[in-house]
Amino acid sequence: MKRSIDRLIFSKGSRNRTGSRLQATGSESVIASVGNAKESGVISPPPPLSPSPPHGLLCLLVILLVSVSVGAGEPAETASRTTAIERPAGTIPGPGCEDGLVLDDGTVEIAYSWVPSAIWGEYVQTFPAGPLVSSRLDSICVCWTRTRSDDSLDFEVVVYSGSQSHPGQRELFSFPASIDAVPEWPDAAFVEVQAPPDAPPLNAGGHHIGVRWNPSVDQFFFVCADQSVTDTPVAGFFRDDRSEGEWGSILETSDPIFADHAAMMVRVRAHRVPWIPTAGPMGLVALALLLVISGWVVLRHR
Ligand SMILES: [Ca+2]
């Protein structure tokens, strides 16, 4: 069966990336924009069968839908190139860090990606501070799906420290990973990636953990997500090579693909470690001065 995303036509309307647009044909809804506006797109499940509306009415509906989505989108200067696919809920087979820190409900309803004009793109999920305070990452489990024939993906696991409300600009650490035989949408699968044993401990007030990959090389791979209008949503952030380092917030953006976001299907396993103080350069200087003064005092009283 031909998947819905295969009917997505990605046409570069002009010489540069900002001129690109997404189009969908057939029965899918269309969220598209032209010119300088965003390149986001959502392919929704086909609508229930109903008598065909008159051609003119269909055109009017499409025009209205496009107008609404453009109006609801972000300003052109903050345009993102996120994209997504949706489907009814389905359970993901296989192990996926079930004994770790799990923030999703185990069923995937949507998956997020980047359009292929992105050179790199990141999605990170915010993890609650408590369970990860003074711990070391053992592994991360990420659920992936795809919509094209290429089923082999190279990506990086990225870990950002920061506050509970926002990731820092610079990563705490990252490490390479890959997955073969990524299932085709609407199937999906977790891959568990072991963290390096020498990875820095997690000691910050907040940690944001996720993936980064090159969507222009590994095209149309998607990170699974849990979608719900009733659950308390878990914060997440995204950015790509055109974001100038600024994170976009999944919960605060007006991008419609994140409207019912509950959680990304990114899970972690970690273990507690003894608290390791991080003195920093000034702390080390102060410690050295204290030792020198102590030694001088001891020597004077001998
Ligand atoms: Ca779900």
Image (spheres, rainbow, N blue to C red):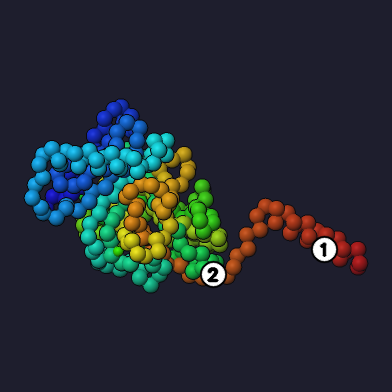
Q: Residue at x 51, y 70 (%)?
A: 272
Answer yes or no: do the residues labelled 1 and 2 have beta carbons within 8 Å? no
Q: Secondary structure at mark 1?
A: helix
Q: Point out which mark residue 23 bears.
A: none
Residue 3 x, y percent position in the rendering: 16, 50
Q: Residue at x 23, y 64 (%)?
A: 90
Amino acid at circle 1: Ser
How many badges with numbers are in the image?
2
Q: Point out which mark residue 273 bears.
A: 2
Q: Residue at x 91, y 63 (%)?
A: 300
- Mark 2 neighbour class, 10 Å CA radius: few under 14, some 14 to 19, many 20 or more: few
Q: Quadrant of residue 54?
A: top left
Q: In the image, ligand 1 is in what quadrant? A: bottom left
Q: Is residue 302 visible?
A: yes
Judged left or right of residue 96, residue 186 is left
User: Which residue is the site of mark 1?
Assistant: 294
Q: Is residue 114 visible?
A: no
* 165 vs 121, nearest the viewer: 165
Judged left or right of residue 300, residue 221 is left
